[in-house]
Every structure is written in structure tokens, then in C-alpha cells.
Amino acid sequence: MKKIAVFASGNGSNFQVIAEEFPVEFVFSDHRDAYVLERADKLGVLSYAFELKEFESKADYEAALVELLEEHQIDLVCLAGYMKIVGPTLLAAYEGRIINIHPAYLPEFPGAHGIEDAWNAGVAESGVTIHWVDSGVDTGKVIKQVRVLRLADDTIESFENRIHATEYQLYPQVLESLGVGRR
Ligand code: GRF
């Protein structure tokens, strides 16, 4: 049985979808007040939270993460709204075992504002991508991606909602394809 951990910085709606369908060993947040931690409590999922600023360096912060991942014998780290770039310490220990979801059709619109950037560019379609994490920002090998249309009567809110709804379908599909067993 593959053991997964989810990293999320804020809201955690993707975490919630994953945890409802798959056993999640733990969720980590880099913000102690993130809403994802409340979701974890309600779902009975173990959670950890600590912040980069509590450490001397990003290397020390990531060493603490690696320790957690090793202690729990995690096979796959699922980033879902984790708003930090994965640094060399975490990559050295887990490259090839970290995936990320991005709310655009990579390599289009990488970075922290994929939905807004696609909207402002006036595209006819954007999408959702799940990819392996490497040292770049949203540059790793694509595992699966799907298109999401921008409709004529869309507002940025309706466009964003359709992208999120697509994310909630894609993450479970990809986990299943990677051999993660459902609950
Ligand atoms: C998602 O759109 C994800 O693709 C992006 O950040 C957002 C996180 O949302 N990386 P949530 O925290 O899962 O609700």
C-alpha cells in the first residue's frame, strides 16, 4: 500500500477531496493558521504545521520535513496548494516522489497566479496539470493535464470554479494511476 502525505498552505479543498477518497497518512501546512488544518481535524487526518521563519534556514526547515516523511515512510508527497518552491534538501531526498497540481495547462501560465494570468491573457481555454516536481517552478514532467474552456458568459469566478472542479476530478484519477489505493 503506497503511503501518501499532502502539503497545503491554505484552504485545502484539494486535500479534502483527496482525503475523502484515499487514506492520507498526514497533511502538512507551512502556516499554523491554515484552514486546511481544520479540514484535517474534521476528517480525522493527522496534521503537522510549522513555518519557515521558525528555522535558521530553508535547508533546516526542509530537513524537518524530510524527517517527518521518513518517520512515516511516505512513498508519495502530493502538493496541493503548497505555496513554496521545493528546495534542494527536500528534492535530494524525495525527487521522483513529489507531485504537484497546477491550475493551468503547463507550460502555459506557470507560477502562483495561473488562473488569473490565463484570464487576463484572454485565452479561449486553459486547464489543469499534475506534474512531477523538479527544481524549477511548475516545470517538471507532466503526468496528466486536461483542458478547461473559457465560456462566453464566464466571469473570473465561474472560470475559476470550473478549474477547481476539474482539479477535484484530476487528482484522484492521477493518484489511482500511480497505484495509490482508495479507501
Ligand atoms: C489550487 O488551485 C491548486 O492548483 C493551486 O492552489 C490551489 C489550492 O487550492 N496550486 P486548495 O488549497 O486546494 O483549495
Image (tube, rainbow, N blue to C red):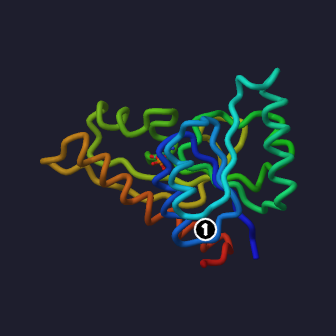
Q: Secondary structure at mark 1?
A: helix
x and y percentages locating residue 97 in the rendered image: 75, 56
Q: Can you tell me whether the CB of the residue at mark 1 lies under 8 Å from the nearest atom of ligand 1?
A: no
x and y percentages locating residue 131 in the rendered image: 60, 52
Q: From the viewer's perspective, is 88 left or right of 153?
A: right
Going 71% across and 52% down the picture, which residue do you hit? 98
Going 84% across and 30% down the picture, which residue do you hit? 60
Viewer-proximal residue, 160 or 36? 36
Q: From the viewer's perspective, is 130 left or right of 150?
A: right
Going 55% across and 36% down the picture, which residue do you hit? 33
**Is residue 9 depicted above or below 12 in this figure?**
above
- Badge 1, how many Cα within 10 Å: few under 14, some, many 20+? some
Res 1 quadrant in image:
bottom right
Q: Amino acid at mark 1?
A: Leu
Going 60% across and 78% down the picture, which residue do you hit? 183
**Is residue 173 depicted above or below 64 in this figure?**
below
x and y percentages locating residue 56 in the rendered image: 82, 21
Viewer-proximal residue, 175 or 66? 66
x and y percentages locating residue 38 in the rendered image: 52, 50
Question: Disc count in the image?
Answer: 1
**Is residue 167 depicted above or below 8 in this figure?**
below
Viewer-proximal residue, 42 or 62? 42
Res 44 quadrant in image:
bottom right
Q: Which residue is mark 1?
A: 175
